[in-house]
Amino acid sequence: MTAAQAAELHAAFVADTWRRLAVLTGVRRCLYCDQAWEPFEELAGPEHFAIQHGADLGARMINSMKELSLHGHDRILLLGSDSPTLPMAHVEQAFLALDRTDTVLGPTADGGYYAVGCRRPDTRMFAGVTWSSEDTLRETEAAFHACSLSVSLLPEWYDVDTGAELARLASEPGIPPNTRRWLDGNPDVMQAVSGGRD
């Protein structure tokens, strides 16, 4: 997959996830990006678009949570952009869990997570976490417990980080439209991942 194809796929994932979340009631969506990008700002609208700040993923997430908390939100959920078929029932379950627990995590099979949420951000929440590793979820849980925060785990799902996961996505029913368009428009990539190559 070329860099251009990967960027187009990412844009499709973001657009589909943003629009799918619109079905949730009582939820204010906000699209955080690592830099200004006009297509995403147009997608979300200026009042729902924000720039991430921080030296690493943990810092960017905690800073985003703190910004949202300062705006009066008492149940905050961050979703990754690479799970475009994530069941909305999992998202609803996360918000329900935050009525009774301090934090939530949505595990992925590779040791990471597709979602993380909290009621009140703690600056130490991601201290010592190794990002993009098979230990990310375990270390995040440990960091939460070190902050005396209770944790609820959501049902496992998957994110699309590898060719095998992209092939799994392509086999699902009900693929959202932007992702479906990308898959149909890149048969060379899909043929490669079906053969087991990333």
Image: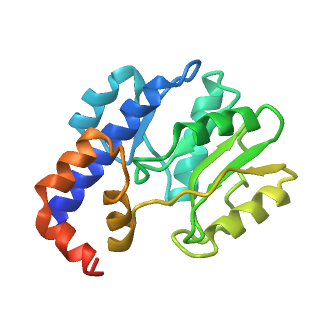
Q: Name the residue at the right extreme.
A: 148
Q: How is the image coloured?
A: rainbow
Q: Is residue 150 left or right of residue 159?
A: right
Q: Residue at x 20, y 76 (%)?
A: 192
The answer to whether residue 1 shows anywhere in this view is no
Q: Residue at x 13, y 64 (%)?
A: 187
Disc count in the image? Answer: 0
Q: Is residue 96 left or right of residue 8?
A: right
Q: Is residue 121 above or below residue 194?
A: above
Q: Position of residue 168 (x, y in %)?
A: 38, 64
Q: Position of residue 177 (x, y in %)?
A: 26, 39
Q: Is residue 93 above or below residue 132?
A: above
The answer to whether residue 111 shows anywhere in this view is yes
Q: Position of residue 133 (x, y in %)?
A: 55, 75
| Closer to us: 117 or 107 | 107
Q: Residue at x 57, y 68 (%)?
A: 109
Q: For residue 107, which quarter of the picture?
A: bottom right
Q: Position of residue 19 (x, y in %)?
A: 37, 30
Q: Is residue 77 left or right of residue 29?
A: right
Q: Quadrant of the N terminus?
A: bottom left
